[in-house]
Image (cartoon, helix red, strand yellow):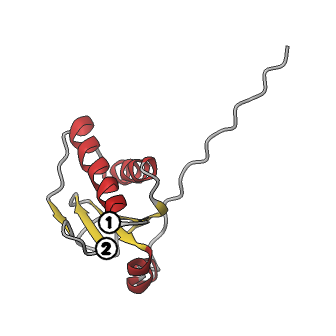
Amino acid sequence: MDSKKLAVTIRELADSKKAENITVLDVRGLSTVTDFFVIATGTSEPHLRAIAEEIVEKLQETAGLRPRAIDGEVPTHWMVLDYVDVIAHLMRAEVRAKYDLESLWGDAPRLRPRRRAKPKAVVD
């Protein structure tokens, strides 16, 4: 799976667990560490863990991918899932506001979610 598809998949998995304010930053050309950051907000420690578990389990099941590292398993209000080419940052709102990764990487383009086409009305 290429890094862009992986970032989009992580965004979708986080969304499936009701993560809030999900942002994907394309840091290719700006970082030598990774290609994409996926940044998402969780409302509580259990919510952060549920989002992380969904991402880890589904990527293992569907693509055979496991994170190189998981940081923040103890309550820190910030979890990091390192998939090398994509790093997911799962944070509580107050931590996200404090560290403001989006501003720190302000030159990075954002990947926008595709808009789903509205179903066409059936006319008899």
Relative to residue 61, is residue 96 depicted above or below?
below
Q: Secondary structure at mark 2?
A: loop
Residue 58, image x, y percentages: 28, 41
Q: Quadrant of the N terminus?
A: top left
**Label 2 Cα neighbours within 10 Å, binned few <14 / some 14-19 / many ≥20:** many
Decide which of tag 1 and tag 2 comes sooner along the chain: 1
**What residue lies at 74% left-to-right and 29% top-to-bottom?**
120
Amino acid at pointer 1: Glu
Number of dots carrying numbers = 2
* Residue 7 visible to an observer of this rendering: yes
Say if mark 1 contacts mark 2, CB within 8 Å. Answer: yes
Task: Name the residue nearer the viewer: 78 or 33.
Answer: 78
* Disc 1 target residue: 45
Amino acid at pointer 2: His
**What residue lies at 24% left-to-right and 38% top-to-bottom?**
63
Task: Name the residue nearer the viewer: 33 or 15.
Answer: 15
* Residue 27 visible to an observer of this rendering: no
Q: Image quarter for residue 47?
A: bottom left
Q: CA distance from mark 1 to mark 2?
A: 6 Å
**What residue lies at 34% left-to-right and 75% top-to-bottom?**
30
Residue 114, image x, y percentages: 56, 48
**What residue lies at 61% left-to-right and 47% top-to-bottom?**
115
Q: Quadrant of the C terminus?
A: top right
* Disc 2 target residue: 77
Relative to residue 14, is residue 33 depicted above or below?
below
**Label 1 Cα neighbours within 10 Å, binned few <14 / some 14-19 / many ≥20:** some
Q: Image quarter for residue 73?
A: bottom left
Q: Is residue 123 left or right of residue 72?
A: right
Q: Is residue 49 left or right of residue 113?
A: left
Residue 67, image x, y percentages: 18, 55
Q: Secondary structure at mark 1?
A: helix
